[in-house]
Image (cartoon, rainbow, N blue to C red):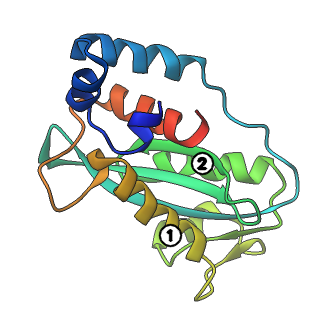
Amino acid sequence: VNLLKEGVGIRGISRLLKVSSNTVLSRILKLSKEVKKPMITLGKCYEMDELCTYIRNKNNRIWIAYSIRKDTREVIDFKVGKRTNKTLRSVVDTLILSNAKKIYTDKLKQYKSLIPSKIHKTTQYGTNHIERMNVNLRTHLKRLSRKIICYSKSLVMLNACLKLYFWG
């Protein structure tokens, strides 16, 4: 888990631990199934954003929509999928069910229809923490980098690695 969080790839982990890459992959999947989402505290402020990456090749663009708690910067929920209302709604619904005081987002048009206007905020510095988290994610998980040829080969592994990074 620590090697994965430090940006070491699957083949790199298998070389360092002297095990096959299939063993590393199966171990990551097994560990990610044991990870549970954290309990959500009611009535807090949250930030929400999305992050672009690729599956298999640069033509297959995929988005990671996730939210963090503004005071503790803990990841509350995430969803991997296309940049549609359905993907964003699953994360927004989690926040609304937790009686969020405020939800800070960027000015993406889809948020206006998903989040009630009385708790939705799009201030200039409202998403600083989550934007910084995007940079950390791209730095620590090489499969999320934009400028290189490193990307996930499967959606299942991307979900597993994100679970371990966020909550492992």
Left or right, residue 103 beside residue 41:
left
Q: Secondary structure at mark 2?
A: helix
Q: Pointer 1 and pointer 2: residues touching (CB < 8 Å)?
A: no
Q: Secondary structure at mark 1?
A: helix
Q: What residue lies at 54% left-to-right and 52% top-to-bottom? A: 66
Which mark is nearer the camera, 1 or 2? 1
Left or right, residue 9 beside residue 157:
left
Q: What residue lies at 39% left-to-right and 58% top-to-bottom? A: 51
Classify 147 as above or below 118: above
Classify 158 as above or below 15: below
- Determine the image quadrant of residue 124: bottom right
Observer-nearest of 125 and 106: 125
The three-letter code of the residue at mark 1 reads: Arg
Residue on which the image places disc 2: 91
First along the sequence among labels 1 and 2? 2
- The image position of residue 28, as x and y in percent, is 41, 21
- The image position of residue 57, as x and y in percent, is 12, 43
- The image position of residue 6, as x and y in percent, is 40, 44
Say which mark, if any, is on residue 118. Answer: none
Residue on which the image places disc 1: 132
Q: What residue lies at 27% left-to-right and 26% top-to-bottom? A: 16
- What crowding class fits label 2: few (fewer than 14 Cα within 10 Å), some (14-19), or many (20 or more)? some
Observer-nearest of 152 and 113: 152
Q: Residue furthest bottom?
A: 124
Observer-nearest of 70 and 80: 70
Q: What residue lies at 88% left-to-right and 51% top-to-bottom? A: 42
- Determine the image quadrant of residue 38: top right
